[in-house]
Image (spheres, rainbow, N blue to C red):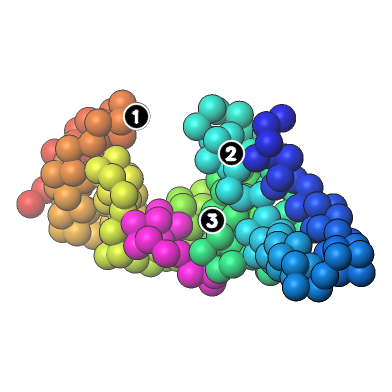
């Protein structure tokens, strides 16, 4: 465990020690210097509640340590006190893990909390609506899925693969509704994204066979 992790994990104990040090300096030396450990102590307490251990999450994600990342998220005891953009990221990550575990109800609730906190970057807001749309599709709520997916593409998505996925799902819903005109429009938009993900490319190929049989 490196110094940064120790510093983040043990903010509260360190803050208590610094606070005590401030009193010791104040009584033994001078109160003119004691304010320094007092200030640092207060800042560490604020950081504990408003930032938590979230500054370490990127390292876990980049190294592929998903279990470590989940354990890190579990260390956040008061998520509602997190600074809003950090709170949004916290719930977004939780939703991703819940989705991987097929806990769709938890994932949906966490995505909504992420959106309520305010997503700082528009493309990630679009991703949240894309995920809500995918969850609604799995639950058979096609009307709700359609609304979420439309909102996702209107807001914008971070890359071609996500955009193509959203348009393909919209096209699929339109086919279910026998709205073949819009099904073709959305399918053509999906193709225009020029996705590179193997699964998305395969989905486009499969749907193209069906679209080709639609009259008009």
On the image, numbered disc 1 is attached to which residue?
199
First in residue order: circle 3 vs circle 1: 3
Give the distance between the C-alpha atoms of the residues marked 3 and 2, in whole angstroms. Answer: 17 Å
Residue at the image point whose x is 7% and y is 52% from the top: 216
Mark 1 residue element: helix
Of the image marks 3 and 2, the number of the one nearer the N terminus: 3
**Pick the front one: 164 or 4:** 4
Packing grade of label 1 (10 A; few <14, some 14-19, many >=20) is: few
**Farthest residue, direction front:** 29
Looking at the image, which is closer to me, 4 or 198? 4
* Magenta region, residue range: 112-130
In depth, the one of 128 and 80 nearer the eye is: 80
Tell me if 192 is positioned left or right of 146 in this view.
left
Question: Alpha-carbon neighbours of circle 3 within 10 Å: few (<14), some, or many (≥20)?
Answer: many
Q: Are marks 2 and 1 in contact (CB under 8 Å)?
A: no
Location of residue 201 by image quarter = top left
Q: Which residue is mark 2?
A: 100
As helix, strand or loop, the secondary structure at mark 3 comes to helix
Residue 150 appearing in the image: no
- In the figure, is residue 47 to the left or right of 60? right
* Cα distance between the residues tagged 3 and 1: 26 Å
Mark toward the viewer: 3 or 1: 3
Q: Is residue 192 visible?
A: yes
Residue appearing at x 19%, y 59% in the figure: 182
Secondary structure, mark 2, is helix
Q: Main secondary structure of the magenta part?
A: helix
Identify which residue is drawn at 76% across, 53% down.
11
Which of the marked residues, 2 or 1, is nearer the chain's N terminus?
Answer: 2
Residue 76 highlighted magenta (yes or no): no
Identify residue for label 3. 89
């Amino acid at each position: 465990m490196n110094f940064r992790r120790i510093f983040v994990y043990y903010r509260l104990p360190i803050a208590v020690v610094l606070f005590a040090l401030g009193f010791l300096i104040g009584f033994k030396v001078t109160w003119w210097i004691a304010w320094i450990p007092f200030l640092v102590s207060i800042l560490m307490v604020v950081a504990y509640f408003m930032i938590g251990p979230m500054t370490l999450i990127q390292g876990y994600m980049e190294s592929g340590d998903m279990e470590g990342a989940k354990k890190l998220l579990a260390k956040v005891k008061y998520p509602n006190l997190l600074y809003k953009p950090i709170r949004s990221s916290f719930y977004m990550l939780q939703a991703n893990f819940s989705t991987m575990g097929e806990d769709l109800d938890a994932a949906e609730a966490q995505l909504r909390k992420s959106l309520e906190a305010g997503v700082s970057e528009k493309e990630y807001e679009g991703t949240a609506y894309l995920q809500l749309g995918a969850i609604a599709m799995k639950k058979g709520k096609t009307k709700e899925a359609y609304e979420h997916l439309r909102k996702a593409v209107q807001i914008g998505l971070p890359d071609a693969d996500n955009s193509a996925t959203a348009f393909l799902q919209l096209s699929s819903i339109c086919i279910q509704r026998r709205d073949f005109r819009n099904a073709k429009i959305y399918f053509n938009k999906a193709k225009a994204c020029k996705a590179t993900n193997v699964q998305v490319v395969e989905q486009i190929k499969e749907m193209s066979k069906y679209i080709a049989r639609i009259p008009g």
